[in-house]
Amino acid sequence: MIDFNRPAFTGREMDYIKDAVNRGMLCGDGVYTKHCSRWMEEKFQVRHVLLTTSCTHALEMAAYLSDIQPDDEVIMPSYTFVSTADAFVLRGAKAVFVDIRPDTMNIDEKLIEDAVTPRTKAIVPVHYAGVACEMDTIMGIAAKYNLKVIEDAAQGVDAFYKGRALGTIGDFGCYSFHETKNYTMGEGGALLFQDEKYLDRAEVLREKGTDRSKFFRGQVDKYRWVDYGSSYLPSELNAAYLYAQLEEHERISRKRMEIYNYYHENLKCLADEGKIEQPFVPEECVHNAHMYYIKVRDIQVRTRLLAYLREQGICSVFHYVPLHSAPAGKKFGRFHGEDVYTTKESERLMRLPMFYNLDMEDVKKVVHAIVSFDGFEGRL
């Protein structure tokens, strides 16, 4: 069986985990947590990076720091993971879903302004597949209406928009280091921001509402409960695993790009025949080969192709079911405007196996199986 995903392993992860154990501090904010944060601050040119237990928790922190209140509205795409909405729903806000662009599967920036109301508090662009949303337009709308921009860059680590790292353009950026991501710590994430004014509150929030971070820096003689907080700090064991991956980020990136490019070049024949659509990357974007997907004619063709691949020993998957069609989406959100593309495009899309340790011979088998499939039913 060719797996859909396996977490990356580069070779030094276990050495760093053993070192973390020997150092005698496993609870977080130790040497490896600091190594990871500093690496990202320097690599992505962002002032503050706080490692978290998940991207979900990074989004929750961003919602709190953005002062999201009950009955506020937050604009986002419906084609995204539930965490994008959950973080704001937990604060009592309503998710306002906007249609996507069919070319990138990102929120349609041209539809955002019409969704703004007096209750709108924030925009949450989701950088699907590590391809940037049209951030200049989004930031312009946010400035016009005094809105926060919280980038869900779960899939966007080491991807760029006009030379700027995804997650560093809005007020806050949220990364994921889940095992399905380019760089992993099993479960984990990070909150990024530029503005110094958020740092004290963010540290307190992440450390269960205490000023523990100041205590460890020697700024206070004891730490106390000073504000609202939760436990968003990951273990040093997780951070040690991640740091080994960040050190090898170029090697991981090269391999993923090799897989992406092989898929793209060798499935082009099907795209030329009108049987599939391939990913589109706008000129101003540098993607990170987070995933490779194809889009087929409709959900019926996709279902048959997925079953065919399983018969060939290949695990391929579809992606999100749009949030506005889910029970909680109907309860906690609303779709603004017409769903022209969100549902239709989501039913056509399927993801191919993509991970660092994937053998290129297996990549070739995936391509051969897709090209050999005889159920495409004419042109798209």
Image (cartoon, rainbow, N blue to C red):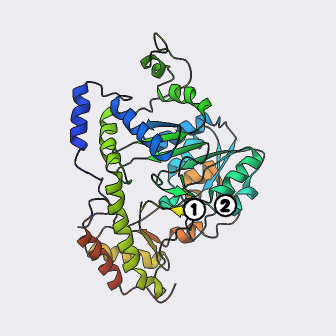
Q: Is residue 179 left or right of residue 101?
A: left
Looking at the image, which residue is at 63% across and 37% down? 66
- State the residue lying farthest toward the top: 221
Q: Is residue 225 visible?
A: yes
Residue 315, image x, y percentages: 31, 67
Q: Which mark is residue 106?
A: 1
Looking at the image, which residue is at 29% across and 53% down? 8
Q: Is residue 224 left or right of residue 353?
A: right
Residue type of the residue flagged with mark 1? Asn
Residue 336, image x, y percentages: 70, 59
Against 292, residue 159 (above or below) is above
Looking at the image, which residue is at 52% across and 71% down? 280
Against 305, residue 226 (above or below) is above
Residue type of the residue flagged with mark 2? Glu
What residue is disc 2 on?
A: 109
How many residues crowd mark 1 within 10 Å: few (<14), some (14–19), many (20+)?
A: many
How many residues crowd mark 2 within 10 Å: few (<14), some (14–19), many (20+)?
A: some
